[in-house]
């Protein structure tokens, strides 16, 4: 059974709240961006631009491009996504992921 337009929107908004709550429970500062479901997550001098998707059809390439285009300058664009009855997952650019890892020089 497919959801109506309102049902899909409600599902998406609920997903955005789930992602925000996960970051807040972990102790991060989360700021909502006006008129969008996107969030900025502030952690240790790093700001993540979080695009949340709660959909059954995974379109990670499309969502990643959206996050990269919409991310404010100086933020790391990530996509948090999940299908029903599955855990949340995150996607980001490899270069951004590598830069986040601790490394010795």
Image (cartoon, rainbow, N blue to C red):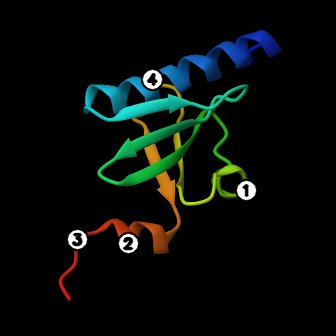
Q: Is residue 9 left or right of residue 19?
A: right
Q: Nearer the viewer, mark 4 or mark 1?
A: 1
Residue under numbered circle 4: 18
Residue at screen point 34% across, 65% down: 100
Residue lying at the far bottom of the rendered structure: 105
Q: Quadrant of the N terminus?
A: top right
- Residue 87, image x, y percentages: 39, 35
Mark identifier at residue 102: 3
Q: Position of residue 73 (x, y in %)?
A: 62, 59
Q: Regarding mark 2 in the picture, which secondary structure is present there?
A: helix
- Look at mark 2 in the image and give the residue it sits on: 99
Distance from disc 4 to disc 3, alpha carbons, whole Å, reads 28 Å
SS of the residue under disc 4: helix
Task: Please tell me whether residue 32 is drawn above or below residue 70 in the rendered image.
Answer: above
Q: CA distance from mark 2 to mark 1?
A: 20 Å
Q: CA distance from mark 4 to mark 2?
A: 26 Å
Circle nearer the viewer, 4 or 3: 3
Q: Quadrant of residue 3?
A: top right
Q: Count the numbered circles shown.
A: 4
Q: Are marks 2 and 1 in contact (CB under 8 Å)?
A: no
Above/below status of 93 relative to 30: below
What residue is at 61 percent from the left and 19 percent from the top? 13
Q: Which numbered circle lies on residue 69?
A: 1
Going by the image, does 46 lie left or right of 63?
left
């Amino acid at each position: 059974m497919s959801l109506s337009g309102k049902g899909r929107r409600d599902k998406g908004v609920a997903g955005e709240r789930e992602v925000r709550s996960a970051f807040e429970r972990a102790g991060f500062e989360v700021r909502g961006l006006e008129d969008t479901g996107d969030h900025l997550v502030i952690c240790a001098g790093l700001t993540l631009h979080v695009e949340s998707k709660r959909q059954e059809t995974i379109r990670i390439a499309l969502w990643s491009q959206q996050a990269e285009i919409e991310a404010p300058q100086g933020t790391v664009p990530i996509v948090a996504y999940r299908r029903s009855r599955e855990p949340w997952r995150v996607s980001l650019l490899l270069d951004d992921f590598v830069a986040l890892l601790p490394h010795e020089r």
